Image (spheres, grey):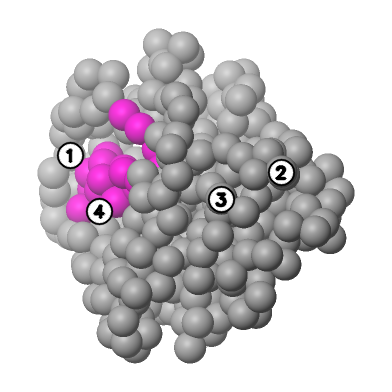
Amino acid sequence: MTTRTLRTAALGLATALALTACGSGAASEEPAEGSAAAEEGFPRTVEHAMGSTEIPERPERVVVLDTGELDSVLSLGVTPVGAVTTAVSDGFLSYLAEDAEDVEVVGTIAEPDLEAIAALEPDLILSNKVRHEDIYEQLAQIAPTVFAEKVGAVWKENLLLDAEALGLEDEAQAALEEYEADAAALGEDLGDPAGTTVGALRFVEGTIRVYTGQSFIGTVLADIGLDQLELPTGETPTFAELSAEQLTQADADLVLYSSYGPATDSGEQAVVAGPLWPRLTAVAEERAYAVEDDVFYTGIGLRAATLQLEQLRDLAL
């Protein structure tokens, strides 16, 4: 499923929702003939990480408070009225920026602006327990709020949860099936993907993160059928953390690396220019690739996963 396919599908979904809204009568009038079908399934109660939430009508003013939720709603053809940014950028992730052009910024992931959120008068707020458990009650007083339990490797389940809150379950399931078919096809084109070990490296504030199969990128590599480098992790199961002096522990047939923030600040520039970098198998065989951090590591969701497939096809074939 290409980016063009996703955008076309999203446009179609958005148009359909807009037509539905236009077909509804005023509150004091009898419902239009087609409105009953449009509102099928609402009101509904959604079970989620913080309990259960009743959503009285199909949401039209949605606020999202993490990158995964922004990816999800845009993938489903819904443009939110508000969203947060990351700590290292004033704008939305590069691969979502065009479609989020008219979305109002309501703080950062770490510090959502509750007043700005309330001012938008949302009818649904989407986030997750990992990021915003402490402010759930405050958010729930503003609008019906649905939280996923975790982030990262559970992105497919989170997409389906967001879709349930939006009344778009069928669209989400169809999109996931198309993505999984594309991932399997890429694996077949690679011939023997299980025979290729991939090291997913990210430079963050002077350390090197080596992502595991329990991470978002790990799920995409697994869907393709690639073997992922696994190193012992600490408290965070999604990645192992190495110093620059431990770089050779990240040896793999294929390396995908990026920086969180500028390469000069993350440590990437110094490591890539250092004596250990050429000792990696992937570097020696010219199979170490700098990838876009927004797509491979910061972003989470269907669009990011689809773009990873496209870019990995270009790199590996």
In the rendered structure, are the residues bearing label 4 and label 1 in contact, judged by CB atoms less than 8 Å apart?
no
Q: Quadrant of residue 228?
A: bottom left
Question: Which comes sooner in the sequence, label 4 or label 2?
Answer: 4
Q: Which residue is mark 3?
A: 249
Q: Is residue 196 left or right of 183 when viewed as pictured?
A: right
Residue mark closest to the camera, 4 vs 1: 4
Q: Which residue sits at x=35%, y=55%?
A: 219
Kind of residue at badge 1: Phe
Q: Which residue sits at x=49%, y=75%?
A: 312
Residue 317 rendering spot, x and y as whole percentages: 48, 88
Q: Quadrant of residue 221?
A: bottom left
- Categorize mark 2 by other alpha carbons within 10 Å: few (<14), some (14-19), many (20+): few
Q: Which residue is mark 4?
A: 168
Indicate the secondary structure of the residue bearing disc 1.
loop
Q: Quadrant of the N terminus?
A: bottom left
Q: Which residue sits at x=45%, y=34%?
A: 233
Q: Which residue is mark 2?
A: 245
Residue mark closest to the camera, 2 vs 1: 2
Q: Which residue is mark 1?
A: 42
Decide: is 99 above or below 156: below
Identify the magenta region.
149-169
| Residue 24: assigned label | none
Query: Distance from label 3 to label 4 (Cα)?
Result: 44 Å
Kind of residue at badge 3: Gln
Decide: is 59 above or below 128: below
- Categorize mark 1 by other alpha carbons within 10 Å: few (<14), some (14-19), many (20+): some
Question: Which comes sooner in the sequence, label 3 or label 1?
Answer: 1
Residue mark closest to the camera, 4 vs 2: 2
Indicate the secondary structure of the residue bearing disc 3.
helix
Kind of residue at badge 2: Glu
In the rendered structure, are the residues bearing label 3 and label 2 in contact, judged by CB atoms less than 8 Å apart?
no
